[in-house]
Image (tube, rainbow, N blue to C red):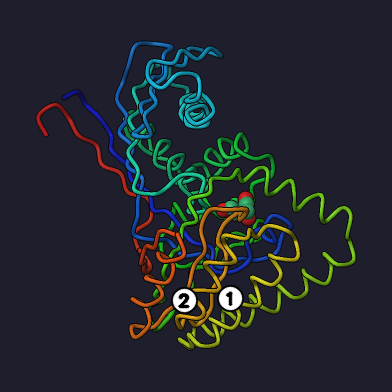
Amino acid sequence: MARRAIASAPGKVILFGEHFVVYGKSSIVMAISRRVYVTVEKYKTEEIIIESDLGYTGLFTGNTYKPLIGGLDGEPILKPVYIAANKTLEFLSINSGLKISISSEIPIASGLGSSASTFVATIIATSYLFDCSLSYKELFNLSLRAEEHVHGTPSGVDQAIAINGGLIEYNRFSGFEKLKSPVDIPLIIGNTGILRSTGGQVAKVRRFAEKNPSIMKTLFLQIEEIISKAKNSLVEGDLEDLGILMDRNQELLRIIGVSHEKLEELILVAKRAGALGAKLTGAGGGGCMIALVTDKVKNSVAKAIENAGGKSLPVNISTNGVEVKLYNDDS
Ligand code: MEV
């Protein structure tokens, strides 16, 4: 096989603060053990071919898209990856075509950060292929440009966690800080299977904020308090308090209109089965919820989610952020 770079980056769950993070509030986010893998090789000049295990392959030449597998439906999915790769080539002043292959363990459009992980892995693999290295800031900013194509005002939380891994506090103005918890944070993800667009959800919150400035102001104060208490509970390893704070965060998400009846159902059954706390994670409107569990209740919570029609997925913190390796012909 030709010289190629293979990178991977983790998905994430937002424990606290999604949406409010877009408005400059802090958030707490954890990388999960599901990853996206991206392989990048050189290809014919001026052409970037992208194949995804979602069943789409397409060829980008300048501004034109030619579907090879999966028809035109593939364009909106592959285009941001093209932007990520193309902006990286421009930034590195490299004139080359690329072949990019994506395989992912993270379900798309579900709030688990699959797009940001794909962009981060694509960008770092592209830079490695040409023996270039990017600083954290360069990788972050290039990936944010691609995310802007997905929705106009990304906070950058998804890129920060895909690059760093672990558990972080993220603020779009002050950046990230690594957090440590003396105990594991065992979660069951419940996927509603309902796909939604992050851009649509962010726009919905924007409309809410414009119509209800004073309510939004109160919610900002409440999320600040939740984040500050959650940081203490994490440091102290107090899972019961964390659970209570997750429930409080969910109340705020309900008010800004990003929950969904299926999410509410999964949250309810998870709590009834003994979860310490539960909330939606990511943009909401469908996608996933998370339930904080103990060893004693984790099976019953997973079962309750499945019985209610959700797909359950147990996850813990993944400490590994983005990783990349270069392979030559004989390796
Ligand atoms: C998406 O994972 C999180 C949101 O807060 C959007 C963003 O921060 O860019 C909904």
Residue appearing at x 69%, y 72% in the figure:
251
Q: Quadrant of the N terminus?
A: top left
Residue appearing at x 46%, y 65% in the figure:
308
Residue receiving disc 2: 292
Q: Please determine whether, in this image, residue 14 is positioned above or below residue 187.
A: above
CB-based contact (under 8 Å), mark 2 and mark 1: yes
Between 235 and 289, the one lying in front of the other is 289
Sooner in the amino-acid sequence: mark 2 or mark 1: 1
Quick one: SS at disc 2? strand
Label number found at residue 246: 1
Q: Please determine whether, in this image, residue 235 is positioned above or below residue 191.
A: below
Q: Position of residue 166 (x, y in %)?
A: 41, 65
Q: 256 left or right of 317?
A: right
Q: Position of residue 145 (x, y in %)?
A: 59, 36
Amino acid of disc 2:
Leu
Q: Position of residue 182 (x, y in %)?
A: 40, 84
